[in-house]
Image (cartoon, rainbow, N blue to C red):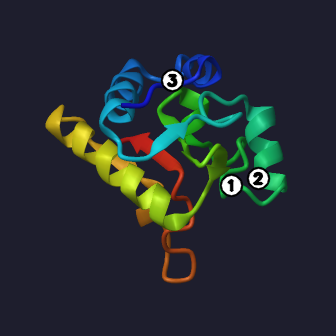
């Protein structure tokens, strides 16, 4: 059984309580450890815009706002062999656990692994948002 680090808990505390509850339950049953990265929780418009400029988001934070700006989204990373991982397989396994927990709780949660057109399909696998 895994648990969040104090940094991940701090970042998680900035998002909607429903997301907090789902993630706290998911970490306990996940076969892969995971955490919440810097800017993985609530973001300011300035932070969101910088991520857009860096090519890490499709939302500019001004004209197109991210669910992170309202606290209705959270990003994760896998933690494998002592290192952060954004491997598709690791993130997919975590997503299955997170989505299962959300479904059991009756919460409509969308995974970034299902985002996008054919060109960008699945491009945001660390991302989860309340719908």
Residue at 64% in and 43% down: 82
Residue 113 drawn at (x, y percent): 45, 62
Instruction: Pick whichever of labels 2 and 1 is earlier in the sequence.
Output: 2
Q: Residue at x 51, y 23 (%)?
A: 15
The residue at 31%/28% (across/down) is 25
Q: Position of residue 101 (x, y in %)?
A: 24, 38
Q: Is residue 122 above or below residue 14?
A: below
Quarter of the image for the C terminus: give it. Answer: top left
Quadrant showing the N terminus: top left
Residue 32 percent coordinates (x, y): 43, 47
User: What is the secondary structure assignment of the residue under circle 2?
Assistant: helix
Task: Using residue 105 as the reference point, say whether residue 37 is left or right of it.
Answer: right
Q: Residues within 10 Å of mark 3 (few under 14, many from 20)?
A: many
Residue corresponding to mark 2 = 52
> How packed is label 2: few (under 14 Cα within 10 Å), some, or many (20 or more)?
some
- The image position of residue 114, as x and y in percent, is 41, 65
Q: CA distance from mark 2 to mark 1?
A: 5 Å
Front residue of 67 and 30 = 30
Q: Which residue is mark 1?
A: 57
Quarter of the view holding residue 106: top left
Q: Which residue is mark 3?
A: 15
């Amino acid at each position: 059984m895994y648990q969040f680090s104090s940094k991940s808990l701090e970042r998680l505390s900035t998002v909607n309580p429903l997301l907090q509850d789902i993630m706290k339950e998911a970490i306990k049953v996940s076969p892969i450890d995971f955490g919440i990265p810097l800017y993985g929780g609530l973001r300011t418009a300035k932070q969101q815009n910088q991520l857009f400029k860096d090519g890490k988001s499709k939302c500019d934070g001004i004209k197109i706002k991210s669910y992170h700006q309202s606290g209705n989204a959270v990003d994760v990373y896998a933690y494998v062999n002592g290192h952060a991982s954004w491997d598709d397989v690791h993130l997919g396994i975590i997503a299955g656990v997170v989505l299962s927990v959300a479904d059991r709780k009756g919460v409509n949660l969308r995974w970034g692994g299902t985002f996008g057109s054919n060109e960008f399909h699945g491009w945001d696998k660390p991302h989860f948002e309340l719908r």
